[in-house]
Image (spheres, grey):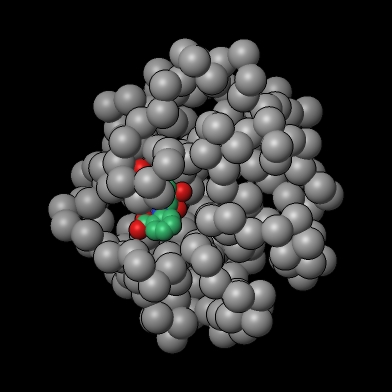
Amino acid sequence: MTRVQVKVCGTTSVHDAVLAAEAGADAIGLVFAPVSKRRVDAATARAASLAVGVGVARVGVFLDQGLDEVLRTAEAARLSAVQIHGPVSSLYVETLARYHPVLRAVRPQDLAEASPPPVGVTLLLDAPTPGGGVPLDWAALQSVFPAGAWLAGGLGPENVAEAIRVLRPAAVDAVSRLEVSAGVKDPERVRAFVRAARQAGLVDPQSYPQ
Ligand SMILES: O=C(O)c1ccccc1N[C@@H]1O[C@H](COP(=O)(O)O)[C@@H](O)[C@H]1O
């Protein structure tokens, strides 16, 4: 048995990257989507990536952005994986997966179409409005949640254990409920989130993404 991985998303500073790493997060998320109130520039993201080092995954979050932009940003910001939101083609996702591990964010209504993902792609089940802090209906998803998929959408210290108990995701991912204001982390909530996820149990390693 292996522990659930924890991603702390929406990192906009070296300070908050180090906070997440010291709290025990396995991954930080760096949002490059132009629409996001947590958007980070490549130079700051690079500094945050270098600060946490290779022991922590650095996931770049993109929404409706071209392949060139994603690949250039991944290199500039020293990303170790990319997370793709929005209505992109299979070819787009498969092309990216030749360069980087891909987290493909899908809404519950898109799950059937996206499963199973191609090699190098892991599904991330998220709410229809990414970064909106609204939880999914975990009970309704229990019978269809794919082995090895990640879970996001309104997770925080108060509900992550229950989400893990119901869906057994390979990883949990949160942003809104870990902030004091958009893009600024609440240290106590970040620590409590990682702690709660850690304590919530273990998952079967065979359900992990390859
Ligand atoms: O956080 C954002 O602003 C954002 C913008 C565009 C695409 C994704 C975004 N965040 C992702 O949303 C989920 C969880 O959000 P929440 O915990 O419900 O607030 C997570 O995957 C973030 O990477």
Q: Nearer the viewer, residue 55 or 58?
A: 58
Would you place residue 18 above or below residue 196 in this image?
below
The image position of residue 139, as x and y in percent, is 47, 13
Residue 122 figure quarter: top right
Q: Is residue 23 left or right of residue 113?
A: left
Residue 53 figure quarter: bottom right
Residue that appears at 56% across and 15% down: 142
Q: How many callouts does the rendering have?
A: 0
Residue that appears at 40% across and 49% down: 130
Q: Is residue 103 left or right of residue 188?
A: right
The image position of residue 59, as x and y in percent, is 54, 61
The image position of residue 41, as x and y in percent, is 40, 81
Q: Nearer the viewer, residue 64 or 165?
A: 64
Would you place residue 8 above or below residue 153 in this image?
below
Residue that appears at 63% across and 52% down: 103
Residue that appears at 78% across and 62% down: 91
